[in-house]
Amino acid sequence: MNRRKLEERFFKGLMLLSMVVVLGSLLLILGTILWRGLGALNWDMVTKLPQGGYYLGKEGGILNAIVGSLYLAGGAALLSLLFSLPIALYLQLYARRTRFAELARLALDVLWGIPSIVYGVVGFAIMLWLGMRASLLGGIIALALLELPIMVRGMDEALGMVPAALLESSAALGATRLETAIHVAVKQALPGLLTAVLLAFGRGIGDAASVLFTAGYTDRLPGSLFDPAASLPLAVFFQLGTPFPAVQERAYASALILTLIVLVLALASRQLARRLTRHVVR
């Protein structure tokens, strides 16, 4: 057997091993939260607010955390989208491969790698400077800053896959760059843009550090943007921190609910992307 075949078999085995490790890790995580949390999951957990003594093992649920997480991650995703799409369009259709565009992409990559606790600390400092208290609005802003580089880079890559011939054809027909961006680039890259939004949303709904300082925590539903808001990651953290086994089981059930929310959104977005792909020109 020659050297090239040995190298091919080695790297093929390495790829298979990597796949097994990734799938094994996923199954281990899902198996753990199903085994520990499925027994504690009931209708009251998703429909009721925490009652007095909930963290001591008494009655109640985590409706406050479910609604709060959806408010926080959804609001942050919408806020990030307002800035991310124009930035990505500018990088691809205006700046393109200029030095400025490459520096901007490098800065976004650096921002992507910054730990979420840093965003929380910076957001908390800004809130103190503005005289704000922990609130839903503060959490949305902090999560939007966290999601922004993820969404921009995802959209940038999706727009970069649009065939150059389509863009040139649009320009040849007399369309402006803005018209080309809206009617050609966005339409062709829509499945990829949707994936970028989902990726950022998933990061936002599962983050605890940035909302710990900015959104706070409460057993009530937020009545306005200036009220504190609970979140599922913090609910898991607080429940696991109790010495009561029954409450710790609820923590795994909360983690299961969080996983199911992300799973449902992922499946829905993939189905929608599959339908949108039918109209994409390859």
Image (cartoon, helix red, strand yellow):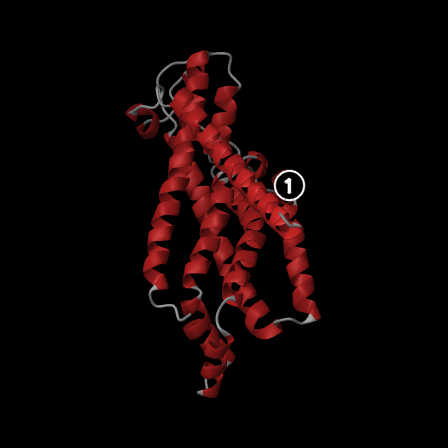
Q: Quadrant of residue 209?
A: top right
Crowd rating for badge 1 (residues with CA inside 10 Å; few <14, some 14–19, many 20+): few
Q: Foreground: 197 or 218?
A: 197
Q: Quadrant of residue 14?
A: top right
Is 75 located above or below residue 194 in the figure?
A: above
Is 200 located above or below residue 193 in the figure?
A: above
- Left or right, 90 with respect to 221, comes to right
Q: Is residue 2 visible?
A: yes
Identify the residue shown where x is 44% and y is 65%.
Answer: 189
Residue where numbered disc 1 is placed: 115
- The picture places residue 223, in percent across and down from the top left corner, at 40, 39
Looking at the rendered structure, the secondary structure element under dot 1 is loop
- The picture places residue 266, in percent across and down from the top left corner, at 39, 46
- The picture places residue 29, in percent across and down from the top left corner, at 47, 29
Residue at the left extreme? 43
Q: How many marks?
A: 1
Is 234 located above or below residue 98 in the figure?
A: above
Identify the residue shown where x is 48% and y is 78%.
Answer: 165
Q: Foreground: 235 or 197?
A: 197
Q: Foreground: 198 or 82?
A: 198
Q: Where the C terminus falls, by quadrant?
A: bottom left
Q: Foreground: 232 or 261?
A: 261
Is 180 located above or below residue 190 in the figure?
A: below
Q: Is residue 230 visible?
A: no
Amino acid on which disc 1 is placed: Pro
- The picture places residue 175, in percent across and down from the top left corner, at 46, 83
